Image: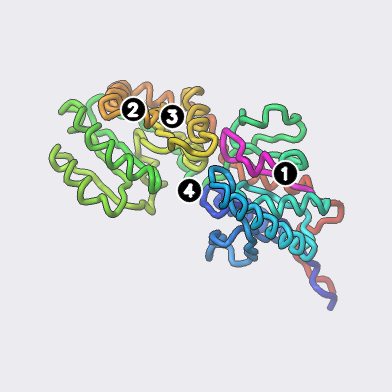
Amino acid sequence: MSPAIQATRILLAAGGTGGHLFPAEALAHELINRGLAVDLVTDERGQGFGDKLPQVAVHRIAAGGVAGKGIGTRLQNMARLGLGYLQSRRLIKRLKPGVAVGFGGYPSVPPLLAAQHAGVSTLLHEQNAVAGRANRFLLKRANKVATSFAKVKFLDQLPADRRALTGNPVRPDIAAIANQPYAAPTTDGSFNLLVVGGSQGARVFGELMPPTIAFLSADLRARIKLTQQCRAEDLDKVAAEYRKQGLAVELQPFFRDIPARLATTHLLVSRAGASTVAELTAAGRPAVMVPLPNSIDDHQAANAAALAEAGGGWIAPQKEFDAAKLAGLLTDLITHPAKLAAAADVARRLGHRDAAMALADLVIGLLPAGAVLQHSEKN
């Protein structure tokens, strides 16, 4: 029996946060289903894909961010990036990937740069409406750049043949919500309001939402069914604020059934990270977005603007909106269901529910001649 033919390997590189790792995980699923082998490169903090894809080998390299750091930290992290590049060169030589795909974050720079120097075709995926610094650094030598938004700052001059709009992959159970038509609220029935926002968003919303609800008229408060993400240490305080208003709310630090809740919600109040906006558009649900202030290159504001300017949601800048202003916006939306239905329709039309498949198609298109797309044994 001859030895098994090795499937062509695809190298994925991503920063350690979920915003970078989730689209990498979605692409890994799709590539494995197509018969390709997948390796992941991240830094020491990256947890990889956990138990979801045990067949994906995780390689950790030295890396560190330099934006917004003091001079000492910048120099230290530049040295770590240099070490990560040397580690990546050895990894590229050993794995011989057919294509390397970068998902942003500083840990993606050393392996993608090493792949480019080794003559390996590279694909970058940009999740935000503002290209991240890692992807901008790698842009010149990249064969293709996949984007989540039609317009991306810093990619304006990129030739059309090197750019593709794929969207940002979302969980299948989120994408499936788009098959359920948005049920606009009635003018006198219950109103499902979902408030989510990660650790920093949960803190801000825990401070902002109780007084916002208090500013609503008594009849509107009586209609609201509120579900809100709240930091564990703030649960008792926030719950007490709502009890003063006679409002029954569901507060949790983390919701494991977001798809089910998203399916029945009438309106979300959320941050505007790339994954959040991708899920809003994939599901086709309207949202009031409160972008994270001072995010690098203000990318959350750009993400929110892309959706709001199309008519798929509304922006409430954290530094400009107080409880009274937010209550005014909510009052307008709750009392005009047609506005919510129109925004839900726009959001749905902007969604990319096949983003992982589109990314995999780009990878396949960059494979060298003779690439093996399936595992097989020959006698």
Secondary element at image label 2: loop
Viewer-side residue, 22 vs 321:
321
Picture residue at 23% right of the left edge, 35% below the top:
224
Q: CA distance from mark 4 to mark 1?
A: 24 Å
Please report contact status of discs 3 and 2: CB closer than 8 Å, yes or no.
no
Q: Quadrant of residue 38?
A: bottom right
List the residue tagged with mark 1: 362
- Name the mark on residue 213: none
Q: Residues within 10 Å of mark 4 (few under 14, many from 20)?
A: few
Residue 11 seen anywhere in this rendered image of the structure: yes
Quadrant location of the N terminus in the rendered image = bottom right
List the residue tagged with mark 2: 321
Q: CA distance from mark 4 to mark 3?
A: 18 Å
Q: Residues within 10 Å of mark 3 (few under 14, many from 20)?
A: many
Lower sequence index among marks 1 and 2: 2
Viewer-side residue, 74 vs 107:
74
Q: Say whether residue 129 is magenta.
A: yes
Q: Nearer the viewer, mark 1 or mark 3?
A: 1
Please report contact status of discs 4 and 3: CB closer than 8 Å, yes or no.
no
Q: CA distance from mark 3 to mark 2?
A: 23 Å
Magenta residue span: 121-137
- The amino acid beneath tag 1 is Leu
- The amino acid beneath tag 2 is Phe
Residue 179 seen anywhere in this rendered image of the structure: no
- Name the mark on residue 173: 4
Q: 204 left or right of 281?
A: left
Secondary element at image label 3: helix
Outermost residue toward the bottom?
1
- The amino acid beneath tag 3 is Ala
